[in-house]
Amino acid sequence: MPVAYAAAAYRQTGVVSRALEANPHQLIAQLLGGTLERIRLARALIARGERARKAEAIRSAAAIVDGLRMSLDRSNGGAIAERLDALYEYIGQRLLEANATDDVARLDECERLLGTIDSAWAQLPQSKSGP
């Protein structure tokens, strides 16, 4: 177990370092990627019957989605920010439902929706000063 603990600590340090070095565009990309990873993990944990770890993965994904939602620039984002807000709210709700019911189809839906956002985000030009 000490090796697993050390590996987890090392990974966490890498995540924090990448986040600190990221510009706002890269940070959003990292958050979207992290959410997708947690959804995939939750799907695997459901298949293995690991309900407690599945619940933690989904709660973590939902928390990131909430953070993405709160970070929207509603005053300057116009209709896009409004649509993303509604979509993030919907995804958060579907994640909660998936958690309560172990419904892989709901996780698949969330992954597809977030994957679309992630792909679109990757196509946006990055500003050196941020969004």
Image (spheres, rainbow, N blue to C red):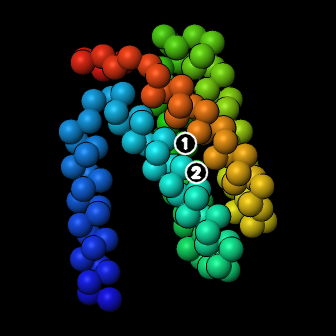
| Picture residue at 41% right of the left edge, 34% below the top | 28
Residue 54: x, y in percent? 60, 69
Classify residue 19 by image quadrant. top left
Please tell me which residue is depicted at 25% across the width and 46% down the height of the picture: 18
Q: How crowded is mark 2: few (under 14 residues within 10 Å), some or many (20 or more)?
A: many
Amino acid type of the residue tagged 2 in the rendering: Ala
Residue marked by disc 1:
66
Q: Can residue 88 be seen in this view?
A: no
The quadrant of the picture occupied by the C terminus is: top left
Say if mark 2 contacts mark 1, CB within 8 Å. yes
**Quadrant position of residue 97:** bottom right
Using residue 75 as the reference point, say whether residue 112 is left or right of it.
right
SS at circle 2: helix
Is 32 drawn above or below residue 106 in the view shown? above
Quadrant in the picture for the N terminus:
bottom left
| Residue name at image x 55 percent, y 64 percent | 41
Q: Mark 1: which amino acid? A: Asp
**Is residue 44 found left or right of 75 in the rendered image?**
right
Q: Please report the residue visible at 26 percent of the width from the left and 52 percent of the height from the top.
A: 16
* Residue located beneath label 2 in the image: 62
Q: Position of residue 71 (x, y in %)?
A: 46, 30
Callout 1 crowding tier (Cα within 10 Å): few <14, some 14–19, many ≥20: some
23 on left or right of 50: left
